[in-house]
Image (cartoon, helix red, strand yellow):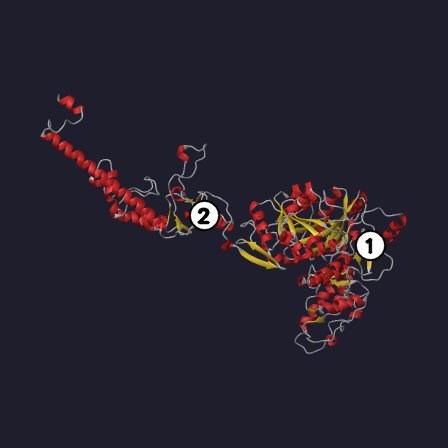
Amino acid sequence: MAAEGAVLPPPPAKEGEPEALNSIEMESLRADVEISEEEVKGKKEESEQESIKEPNNSNLLDASSDSQREKHISIQRTLADLEKLADLQEGCLISAASQNADHSVAGVGKKSCPLCLEEKFKACYSHKLHRHLQNLHWKVSVEFEGYRMCICHLPCRPVKPNVAADQIKMEAHYHCIICSATITRRTDMIGHIKRHVNKGETESRFIPAPAPKSTYEILKEADTDVQVLPNYSTPQKTDSYFNPKMKLNRQLVVCALAVLAEERKPLECLDAFGATGIMGLQWAKHLGNSVKVTINDYNENSVRMIQENCHLNKMKVVMNFKEEEDCDETIEEGEENLPAIEVTKMDANVIMHLRAFDFIHLDPFGSSVNYLDAAFRNVRNLGIVSVTSTDISSLYSKAQHVAQRHYGCNIVRTEYFKELAARMVVAAVARAAARCNKGIEVLLAVALEHFVLVEVRVLRGPSPADDTVKKIRYLLHCQWCEERVFKKDGNMIEENPYRQLPCDCHSRMTGKTAVELGPLWSGSLFNTGFLRRMLFEAVQYGLEDIQTLLKTLICEAECTILKQFSIHGPTSQNKQEECGVFIKTPDTAADYYVVHGKRKNNENSQNGTKRQKSESNAEHPAFYYNIHRHSIKGMNMPKLNKFLHYLSQAGYRVSRTHFDPMGVRTNAPLVQFKSILVKYSTPTYMGVQSEGSLQASDESQFTGPLHTSCMISLKRNRSTSKSYSEIPHILPLSHLP
């Protein structure tokens, strides 16, 4: 019966014995203890949830109800919350005792770290564990939105399947509060969080949501407002890249489009890389209904921001112009006079292959060579392709191997490196156009500190394509005197290519003295008539920042120092035909003709041939000289404007250049350039002296050894008060050989 009584449930009270009554009391006591422990646990969980919700109810991380359950245990608000995980509070001792299986007294009070393995940190008492959590985990944590992401030593990171068990290393890492990624280094974790903030991703589960309006910054440029995200000027850290230093570039493109809009209306123009949409917004703002603007970008966040910027500037967003024309009845009353902008989300090459445009602007981050073939695929005849390249390190000869890889050009660092970059980009554009049986006419080529801008007019047909390819040549550059000249046309191998250089450095020096650069564009970089019309549009729209630059470009295109800017309106009779369109010119031509995209008759073609020959003879000289690069040691140079006047008096064409503030564009050879510079220079030690005291005949020049001896004798006689003519060591310049 005893054995059966051990298995059966306890008997009723009337059959009870003292031992049975004691066992019933013990079981009831244990049940009461378990109920009290469950109540303590419930109260503890409620207090934890209240303490977590109280500090920041407005936090974005508390927006989702299950965000608290999903975050890792290493992400806490305060050190006290981290200590609660280890049951260091006095109210949690009872639950700690209940979790202990053997109820041994030695186990009470010793707890293990919740963020470390027992092999790394053994169980210890509360004061030691407190120091461990504070010094190892809390001090190196990363803060974000009131939370602390503490360093974790648990095996949370995924292990590669091909790694053996004995080779597994438990690395310390952080858990991202936004995307739950595990990152080992603290600096990388800080950068990771900053990238989330810049993209507007502040909610858990890695949901790319737009940032709140308080994080937007509104910038204004040329009466156009744009919203940008933080770090808008750093393209690696934001989707909506906006560079305020490219203001001149945007205004030049606006003026070029305005000139094209005077020729035909309406224009279909494309901004292939919209970013914030500032370029297309300025087109629609200034030109209105004369252009149909399409802004494209491949990034979804950028497309969303472009649409918001269109609404900010009170412009209507259209998904497709053709569908909009078919649905005229759906237009509301207040939207009739609003400019419409089409916003698309495509790859730039895809949209240029699918549709035809009159004006295309390419402004990728870096080189634009990957998009040139698609740009010339469907561009309309007499349209304009505008290319902005910002890969300055390769274009300006700092990364020559990259220039060889992208543009197929061999270049070195020279004094005219900016014009070399412009001609390199134009050569790449010309080859891309020729592959599509199209030729180009260069309207504008600008190389400034941050970008290279090239604008070309497209001429359809194999004949213009052949003429364009013929203007791509190699350049011979002397590394001793920096003289340069384009190689002559022809396929025959020349016996001595050094003969083409005007200098005689190869005969006087040993070894090889020149290098072959290119292939480069050898034609003109400017169109004077187009630049004058751009200046007229800049004055009309009040774009004052580029007016000085355009005036410099006009003087450089004509290679003159006479600043004569006759600005004519669209109805002026001072026009001539150029590539089938009107071009304003400074001279009054009574006879002009217009052919819009049609074949010319024999008489017109003969006149056009004569005009092209006269224009080719009047092209500006290639490249320029830096006056400081060719200065003479120990001599004071004349002022730049006076030196330009002296070159002009000598019978040479001369002008300043926008490529270099101290550059001189002239058709004078380098030998004559140096001789005139020496003629009007004064010795440094003499102070004030009348210019022209150093008189030299056209035949006499300073040679290297004689010039060195003259400088040595000048230094020896600096202490004396004798004049330059009284020094016996120096012969008069007229006696120099």
Q: Quadrant of the C terminus?
A: bottom right
| Quarter residue 554 falls in | bottom right
**Frontmost residue, 235 versus 332:** 332
Q: Are marks 2 and 1 in contact (CB under 8 Å)?
A: no
**Residue 515 place in picture, x, y as percent:** 72, 50
**Residue 397 visible within the image:** no
Q: Of all residues shown, which one is farthest toward the left? A: 18
Residue in the picture at 34% in, 42% down: 116
- Marks 2/1: CA–CA distance: 62 Å
| Quarter residue 153 falls in | top left
**Frontmost residue, 477 versus 554:** 554
Q: Secondary structure at mark 2?
A: helix
**Residue 105 place in picture, x, y as percent:** 20, 40
Decide: few, some or many residues near mark 1? Use Cα within 10 Å; few <14, some 14-19, many ≥20: some
Type of amino acid at the residue the image marks with label 1: Glu
Position of residue 620 in the picture relative to residue 446 (left or right): right
Q: Of all residues shown, which one is farthest toward the bottom? A: 721
Type of amino acid at the residue the image marks with label 2: Met
Image disc number at residue 577: 1
**Frontmost residue, 517 versus 107:** 107
**Residue 374 place in picture, x, y as percent:** 69, 43
Residue in the picture at 73% in, 61% down: 535
Position of residue 335 in the picture relative to residue 119 (left or right): right
Decide which of tag 2 and tag 1 comes sooner along the chain.
Answer: 2
Decide: few, some or many residues near mark 2? Use Cα within 10 Å; few <14, some 14-19, many ≥20: many
Q: Would you name the residue on which mark 2 appears? A: 189
Q: Quadrant of the N terminus?
A: top left
Residue depth check, mark 2 versus mark 1: number of the one nearer the observer: 1
Position of residue 130 in the picture relative to residue 437 (left or right): left
Q: Secondary structure at mark 1?
A: strand
**Residue 641 place in picture, x, y as percent:** 73, 68
